[in-house]
Amino acid sequence: MASATASEDIPGTYGLRIVGAIKDRYDYFVKEGPEEFFKNRMMKYKSSVYRVNLPPGPPLFPEAQAIVLLDSKSFRVLFDMTKVEKRNLFIGNYIPSSDFTGGFRMLSYMDPSEEHHANLKKFCLDILKMNAHKWFPEFHRASEELWTVVEKDFSEGRKKPFNAHNEHILFNFLCRCMVNRNPSETDLGNDGPSCVKKWLALQLAPIASSGILPKMLDEITIHAVPLPPFLARKDYRRLRDFFYQTEVLDTYQGLGVSKEEACHNLLFLVCFNAFGGLMIFFPNIIKRIVQVGGQLQRNLAQEVRGAFRANNNSLDAQALNRMRLVRSTVYEVLRMDPPVPFQYAKAKQDFVLETHDARYQVKKGELLAGYQPMAMRDPHVFEDAHQFTPDRFMYDGDKGQNLVQCLFWSNGPETEEPSLHNKQCPGKNIVITLACLFVAHIYLRYDSIDIDHDAPSSRIVFTALNKATF
């Protein structure tokens, strides 16, 4: 890696305008893939910080000439609101049309310096706090629904992917908790997940692979041209009408947020932030646990059942606090497979950016892009950084390491809390709780599980569901 005491120029190049952007996008999506794209350039420049074009880019999207941050130390600048801003940088250096969100600009695209940011962040935090009493009982109900239908398919020999069941029940669960409505009992019916995924796909298409089209066809279609909102208009209208009818919105009049704007932000919070993240995160938990082997599953089952029985056969917050291995496993999945790979910011002043072994000069207005899968596998911070180690965070405090502060999945360090003055995920703590509950419910029910390891990576197909025997 580069070494210096005085600040130096950041390595890397953007190449010719448009041509350089198209070449880097081709390398990112087609030639190398994201992980190798960043690794190869890190080795080339001998630096964990360098310049490169990121997708989608010109000619039909804004330029994304970025300074990439791939180590834990430099990554932290993305949370320093004295040095950076995050206006319109939620999913990259572009913002999808506001027609996707009812004509409103969502909280996720606002910077804390904007006056309206505080109003909307307070609205989201209040919604989560107001419904705190529902999370445990509703998750128990959802878990029973989920595993009952999964077991039915399994017993009948049907290899239906877990994902579809998970998404349906997850969406209903989130709506019951945060909207006080069960979609299945309304005109939306069971169509919620499909409406949401279509709406999400159209917005994220420029920075994602379709998984259907050949890679080169992706390049000249979804990566080249913004997809029009009218393709999701009917689906979004159905979602909007479902959310608008909740009495939750009537509570928040007078907070500087109209009922219509509150409706679209609640929809975004539930569908984009919560559902969009958890539908990826829960399958990742299963895959990572199963890949480790049987001993981890035995240890998880023993810990979960011990804590459950010590708590009068009740699975509540007190029981979860006893499950150190469960929590550590959840943290390790987030470290290895963060549901959101990128975080972005722009420098609002000149400053010196520090890595573990170098100092670089950043100019006002420059785009910074942190790639979490590499920053949270920083070998300067984590021993055996590229290995999934479920108990990594189990004795964190005992060793005085505080490794958990280097988990950035929530748009901030895990040791900090969301507030009106930062961009940390409002539901950060609830995500951890739900993930721990997800694991706990599995190992109250089963001694072990297994999946089809030859299935596509995005699909979970169970090959074993071994019921609890102790």
Image: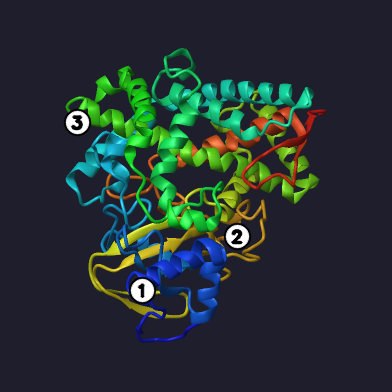
The residue that mark 1 highlights is 353
Place of residue 172 in the rendered image (x, y in percent of width and height, measured from the top left): 49, 23
Query: Where on the picture, by quarter, is residue 240?
Result: top left
Residue ID at (70%, 29%): 444
Q: In this view, does 322 lie above or below 109?
A: above
- Could you tell whether 246 is left or right of 317 in the image? left
State the residue in front, 231 or 137.
231
Q: In this view, does 391 lie to the left or right of 230?
A: right
Q: Position of residue 54 (x, y in %)?
A: 41, 64
Give the crowd class for mark 3: few <14, some 14-19, many >=20 residues within 10 Å: few
Q: Which of marks 2 and 1 is in front?
A: 1
Q: Mark 3 points at which residue?
A: 255
Q: How far apart are labels 1 and 3 at the CA level?
A: 38 Å
Which of the numbered marks, if any, corresponds to residue 399? 2
Task: Locate residue 210, reporting x and y percent.
Answer: 51, 48
- Indicate the quadrant where residue 15 lies: bottom left
> Nearest the camera: 397 or 285?
285
Instruction: Residue 440: tell me if it is visible.
Output: yes
Disc 3 or 2, which lies upstream in sequence? 3
